[in-house]
Image (cartoon, helix red, strand yellow):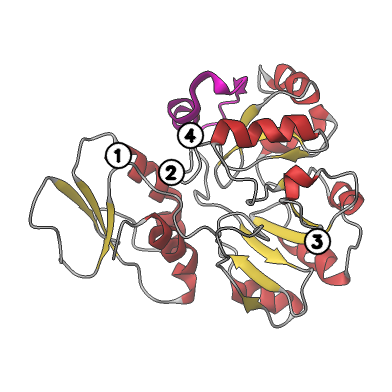
Amino acid sequence: MIHPQLEQAAALIRAGRLVAFPTETVYGLGAHALDERAVRRIFEVKGRPPTSPVIVHVASIEMARSLASAWPEKAQRLAERFWPGPLTLVLPKQPSIPDAVTAGLPTVGLRMPAHPLALALIEASGCPIAAPSANRFTQLSPTSAEHVSKSLGDAVDLVLDGGSTPVGIESTVLSLAADPPLLLRPGMIAREEIEAVIGPVEVRTSAAAADAHPAPGMHARHYSPRTPLLLVRGRALPAHGRGVYLRHGESMPGEPRGYAAALYATLHRCDGEGYDWIAVEEPPDTPEWDAIRDRLRRAALHR
């Protein structure tokens, strides 16, 4: 079924306006990726520093190739295996991509989302769409249209409501501009799955605050609810105040994909309950939980 606001949303994108839309990971705040003025408005609305690049969303491998100045065999193999899906590939960019998209760096993050409404919007707009998460910078990412509206209000020209996002946390980001390739942000496509396709991958998930970051999601503080979030082991809970304790396998799903899908929605709900703190049990220290541990550690006030 075609979304009743799809053509309106596409017209807004072409006109340089902002549209929030669902992907399979989280809701994105989208603008025409080749319109620098439109992209800069994303940064203004989010309060996002210019050192943090934004991902460009495409509707096909061919569109991605047109935006990259180099498309190595590893990019083709990964795109054929994981696209559409929650994997962003960082590659050398074409000059047509504005510096505002890439934090002034010569590389760009490209991904083909696995959400029919996101793909329909890109195709109807006739252009690639630059889109970080549709929320204020460092705050909780949105997994529903309601989350977007609460965070950004009328600063967005249109919110396309596509229901809850099924993956629930942001994409894996892999740089193919480095040799060996660098995992810059963990996601639900794991390092081991990538290595099975292209061989060894190294990991670098932090960057100096003042420098241009090669990928989004590398700030030390990120993905945070307004309520202080404490990452704990066992039942080492605060002695004072009113709080809630989230444990995997009890109040949260016990397996990583279900946990990821529920994480931000649960934190949004807890954030609106007037608690003094949200305590989250630290997830298992195993590879399949890497992305969830990354999000919680960046969101936590302390461990």
Asked if the stretch drawn in magenta spans residue 154, the answer is yes
Pointer 3 residue:
91
Instruction: Find numbered disc 4 in the image and state the secondary structure of the residue it sits on.
Output: loop
Tag of residue 271? 1
Q: CA distance from mark 1 to mark 3?
A: 37 Å
Instruction: Find numbered disc 3 in the image and state the secondary structure of the residue it sits on.
Output: strand
Residue type at the position of mark 2: Leu
Marks 2 & 3, CB-CB < 8 Å contact = no
Residue type at the position of mark 4: Ser
Residue type at the position of mark 3: Leu
Q: Position of residue 188 (x, y in %)?
A: 55, 61
Marks 1 & 3, CB-CB < 8 Å contact = no
Furthest residue in direction front, as rendered:
210
Marks 4 & 3, CB-CB < 8 Å contact = no
Estimate how packed mark 1 is, as few (under 14), some (14 to 19) or many (20 or more) residues with alpha carbons within 10 Å. Answer: many
Q: CA distance from mark 4 to mark 1?
A: 15 Å
- Mark nearer the N terminus (4 vs 3): 3
Report the number of numbered marks: 4
Q: CA distance from mark 4 to mark 3?
A: 30 Å
Which residue corresponds to the image point at 39% horizontal and 76% vertical from the top-left? 285
Q: CA distance from mark 2 to mark 3?
A: 27 Å
Q: CA distance from mark 4 to mark 2?
A: 12 Å
- Mark nearer the N terminus (1 vs 3): 3
Q: Quadrant of the N terminus?
A: top right
Which residue corresponds to the image point at 53% horizontal and 18% vertical from the top-left? 154
Pointer 2 residue:
140
Asked if residue 54 can be seen in this view, the reply is: yes
Estimate how packed mark 3 is, as few (under 14), some (14 to 19) or many (20 or more) residues with alpha carbons within 10 Å. Answer: many
Marks 1 & 2, CB-CB < 8 Å contact = yes
Tag of residue 144? 4
